[in-house]
Amino acid sequence: MDVLYFAWVRERIGLPREQVETSAVTVADLVEELKAREARYAAAFADLSALRVAVDQELTEFDAPLAGAREVAFFPPMTGG
Amino acid sequence: MRIEVQEAPFDLGRETSDFASGHKDMGAIVTFTGVVRDLARGDLDRMEIEHYPGMTQKALEKIAAQAQARWSLGDVLVIHRHGALTPGEMIMMVATAAPHRKDAFEAAEFLMDYLKSRAPFWKKEFTRDGAEWVAAKDADEDALTRW
């Protein structure tokens, strides 16, 4: 699936998007897989309360299932308007 | 409903005038315009607004549709810019048309509250000393509870 990063999450991880092969069942499982990769991922995902997630471009929660998902995006709380 | 996500500036007067014309049954037009505000120190060089292409349009349409479901509205307009903006530049506008002003005002406030924390935009402020992401305020999240 495609994993996208925005704002400081993108800066901390160092790329805007990547293809990830995963069998993670939930968003939280995917986060654990990413954190185990490298320190920059662990740093970006250190505090999940500071992050938001969208699955297939819909805001959701970290316990959301990933079955059938094509795109997961991680970003800080939004500051529109 | 018209939703525009764009880098280019918009003409507030023309947009408002176009939006307000052509209705015979709308007694109230409310507009809100968001402007890049300089920092208290007066040293904001520019603000850069990042967004999530693909999701942004859908998220804004969803928020506008919620407003239309909740209030008696004739029309809704949302224009939101992204990219680099300098102090004094207009970032975004919402406009609502309704038979009566209460619906138009409330719907515009609802749109603004949801745009703040449910539309995928992120602001970064650049000064001579460096750059900093604008943090979301608890008050913005709390504002949603009144709806």
Image (cartoon, coloured by chain):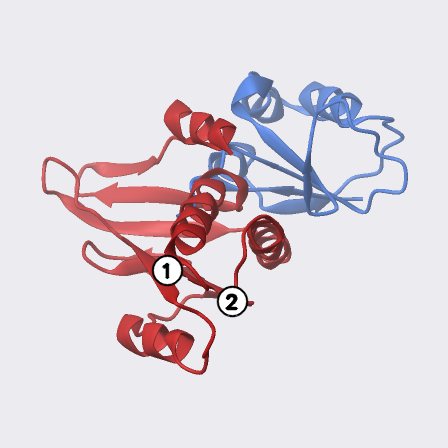
Q: Give the number of the mark in front: 2 or 1.
A: 2
- The numbered mark, 2 or 1, whose residue comes first in the sequence reads 2
Considering only vertical position in the picture, is B62 above or below B147? Answer: below
Q: CA distance from mark 2 to mark 1?
A: 14 Å
Considering only vertical position in the picture, is A18 above or below B65? Answer: above
The answer as to whether the residues below labels 2 and 1 share one chain is yes
Q: Which chain is red?
A: B
Amino acid on which disc 2 is placed: Asp
Amino acid on which disc 1 is placed: Met
Q: Residues within 10 Å of mark 1 (few under 14, many from 20)?
A: many
Q: Is residue B146 visible?
A: yes
Q: Please report the residue visible at 47 percent of the width from the left and 35 percent of the height from the top.
A: A8
Q: Which quadrant, please, contains the N terminus of chain B?
A: bottom right
Q: Please report the residue visible at 89 percent of the width from the left and 30 percent of the height from the top.
A: A23
Q: Position of residue B57 (x, y in %)?
A: 59, 59
Q: What chain letter is assigned to the residue under label 2?
A: B
Q: Position of residue B54 (x, y in %)?
A: 64, 57
Q: Please report the residue visible at 51 percent of the width from the left and 32 percent of the height from the top.
A: A76
User: Label 1's element?
Assistant: strand
Q: What chain letter is assigned to the residue under label 1?
A: B
Residue under label 2, please give it. B75
In the image, farthest residue toward the left = B42
Q: Position of residue B89 (x, y in %)?
A: 24, 60
Color of chain A here? blue
User: Label 2's element?
Assistant: strand
Q: Residues within 10 Å of mark 2 (few under 14, many from 20)?
A: some
Q: Is residue B3 visible?
A: no
User: Any mark on residue A81, and which?
Assistant: none
Residue under label 1, please give it. B93
